[in-house]
Amino acid sequence: MSLAIGAALLAASAANAAQVEVLHYWTSGGEAKSAQVLKQMLEQKGHTWVDFAVAGGAGANAMTALKTRVISGNPPAAAQIKGPAIQEWGDEGVLLSIDDVAKRENWDKLLPPEIASIMKYKGEYVGAPVNVHRVNWLWINADALKKVNAQPPSTWDDFFKVADALQKAGITPVAIGGQSWQQAEMFETVALGVGGAEFYRKAFVQLDQATLKGPTMVKALETFRKIKPYTDKGQTGRDWNMATGMVISGKAGMQFMGDWAKGEFSVANKVPGKDYLCVPGPGSRNAYTFNVDSFVFFKVKTPGVEKGQKDLASLLLSPQFQEVFNLNKGSIPVRQGMDLSKFDACAQKSEADFKSAGAKGTLVPSWAHDMIDKPSVEGAFYDVIGKFWNDDSETAQEAANKLAVAAKTD
Ligand code: GAL
């Protein structure tokens, strides 16, 4: 290539290159590796990734940082936002439509309809989904289980037997971090396992008052509390990935966590089926709580950024990104029709269970991970569950009554 043509090409790509600032909360080992994939692929398109990472599992800190930036009139180009919060941002009039990209690339055909509708505001795509995480998993250290000569539990009775045996063997049975979202997530999985998908939907999707304070909810809360003596004293403020680390090292036996936990096992070179096991939470084998990560795009003043935003949107749904990103993240591709032969047994099971739960009507969104309720209701639920976990003097019925009140939060 002549020098002149080379220089002209460089100038052309520089003219199309944008600085794309991306807000996300992927800072644990497995998460950071996944975010890195995104950065690299965006940079291959000639744009510059400006990292706006805000640490804190499940993203509450990131959402606070985002509000400050949007209110000051300086939003990032893209942000990791999901569920009904997308509609709230749409109402503020600050989101960029990416419907032209979605139409060109036929997203309506590539995405399950339930997920496509979450990504649209007033009929136009404003969000691009990247994955499907399953939340109702129990992660188990295989050696710990062998040590106590037990099988992975599939009922609550079995679960508490295994927990007893682990405790006797000097292993912390259940790893958890004392943060309200982790408590909420564990409770969500317990409620699904105790009450089933129909109960779950009535309580957390329909916010039915009688179900929220009824006997099944009370039983779910009692089961949740029964787990507490099997957790350790050092849990206050612990991050979720530190709790996963306890299971990886064998200090703890089990953890209730979505399959982003698998990203941590992978970074530690652990193999599913050999070093660790993934099983659905007790009682929830036939159901599936889903959590879909997505990015939305903000209208920004700097000229030229829109090209970078739309290239990013297109990249997120591309088969190559969907494969590499999800292999690192622990989730499965949200793009339908992908070949999953490179994915491990946990991911294959997730995919099969996602499909069969969809067919059976037992596929439900995760409320603890922003997929159902308005952020205000979700926050009020977090508070009730956190208080109940921390205060042994509160009865399960009192907490259930509070859930019913929390459901009416504006
Ligand atoms: C979830 C998010 C996941 C994972 C997790 C812990 O809300 O959907 O991608 O990163 O939080 O940070």
Image (spheres, rainbow, N blue to C red):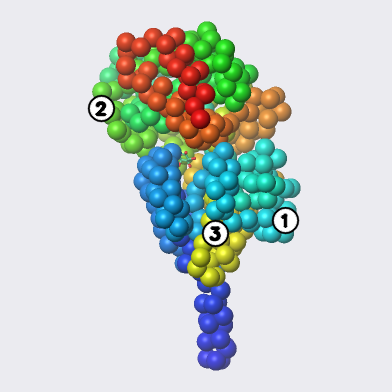
Q: Earlier in the sequence, mark 2 or mark 3?
A: 2
The residue carrying mark 3 is: 299
The residue carrying mark 1 is: 103
Q: Name the disc covering residue 234, or none.
A: 2
The picture quadrant where one finds residue 195 is top right
| Residue 228 placement (x, y as % from top left) | 35, 17
Q: Residues within 10 Å of mark 2 (few under 14, many from 20)?
A: few
Q: Is residue 11 above or below residue 118?
A: below
- In percent of the image, x 53 and y 82: which residue is there? 11
- What amino acid does circle 2 point to? Gly
Q: Do the residues bearing badges 2 and 3 touch, measured as CB atoms within 8 Å? A: no
Q: Earlier in the sequence, mark 1 or mark 3?
A: 1
Question: In what element is the residue under mark 1?
Answer: helix
- In percent of the image, x 36 and y 21: which residue is there? 387
| Residue 320 placement (x, y as % from top left) | 60, 56
- Residue 161 visible in the displayed image: no
Q: Is residue 302 above or below residue 334?
A: below
Q: Do the residues bearing badges 2 and 1 touch, measured as CB atoms within 8 Å? A: no
Q: Earlier in the sequence, mark 2 or mark 1?
A: 1
- Residue 310 visible in the displayed image: yes
- In percent of the image, x 54 and y 31: which residue is there? 373
- What amino acid does circle 1 point to? Lys
The picture quadrant where one finds residue 203 is top right
Going by the image, does 231 lie left or right of 255? left
Q: Nearer the viewer, mark 1 or mark 3?
A: 3
Question: In what element is the residue under mark 3?
Answer: loop
- What amino acid does circle 3 point to? Lys
Q: Which corner quadrant holds the N terminus?
A: bottom right
Q: Nearer the viewer, residue 19 or 323?
A: 19
Mark 1 to mark 3 CA distance (whole Å): 19 Å
